[in-house]
Image (spheres, rainbow, N blue to C red):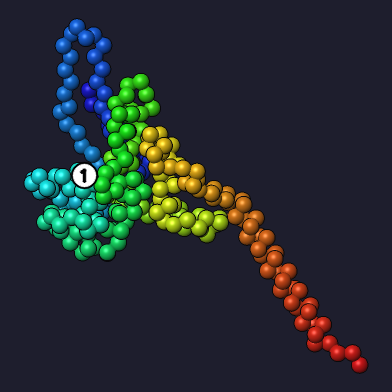
Amino acid sequence: MSARKQLSVEGGHELRLEFTVHDPSKTAVVGLEFMRLWMRREYAQCEDSKACLNSLNGTSTEDKELRQSNVAQFHCLNGSSTSHVCDKWRACLDGQDNSHIPRLLRLLKAAGVTATASVARSDVALIADSNNPSAESCVNPPNQDPESWDCDCHDRMLEHCEKLRAQTNYVGSTDHCLRSQLCEDPLLCDAWKQQMCGSEHVLPQLPSTSQLLMTRAERSRSIQQESETEHVESSFTNKRCV
């Protein structure tokens, strides 16, 4: 059997292969002979170069630990780690545009990863709970790859924050805005939301296009009325009674 899946929506995706044995009394075997994945060239270049993942391709235990542990990456990025692997990764990140270290730290903080631990612990039990089918497909932010979010999501999330500040009365910090966007994502695990999200993480809704057009029209009319009022007042001021 062969299959090809083409995705129409950009962003992070998870490929899951399931093999079910219908008759436990019989021996069942499945094998995957060949798999090939395609991604946008810009995304691949960002992952390898800007996020400097190619600098963590070594085979040492330290290389693997730093690549696979978000807590270890947080230690490295906030300057509390002095390993040579961390120094190599930071040097590569600093050699880019000096923005990726704060970007990665913002995303790790938004996901709930700290210098001491990740809040993934309760979700591990939740995902393993076969009585909770929703846990099988939910996304747990602390276990996700911050470099992929940096290359794929960070700019869109910041753009949404800027739109909120420009079009609503939202005045929250960037850290608050990023965490709140994660809290509102329906694909994220409920156990993570219960730990990391509260009523303060509810973002205002962006106005619709029609609402924006009405607001602009009202502003235009207001400016025009003010201009006409000033013109009338100026006309009366310049007149003199004889």
Q: Nearer the viewer, residue 69 or 195?
A: 195
Q: Nearer the viewer, residue 5 or 151?
A: 151
Q: Relative to 220, is 5 above or below?
A: above
Q: Which residue is mark 1?
A: 69
Which residue is depicted at the point 33% across and 29% down? 126
Which residue is depicted at the point 40% across and 54% down? 175
- Quarter holding the C terminus is bottom right
Q: Where residue 208 sits in the image (x, y, percent)?
A: 57, 49
Hey, which quadrant is residue 82 in on the image?
Answer: bottom left
Q: Residue furthest front?
A: 116
Q: How many marks?
A: 1
Q: Where residue 169 sits in the image (x, y, percent)?
A: 56, 56
Element marked by disc 1? loop
- Drawn side of residue 188 relative to residue 61, left or right: right
Is residue 187 something one can see in this rendering? Answer: no
- Quarter holding the N terminus is top left
Q: Where residue 170 sits in the image (x, y, percent)?
A: 52, 55
Task: Please name the amino acid that badge 1 sits on.
Answer: Ser
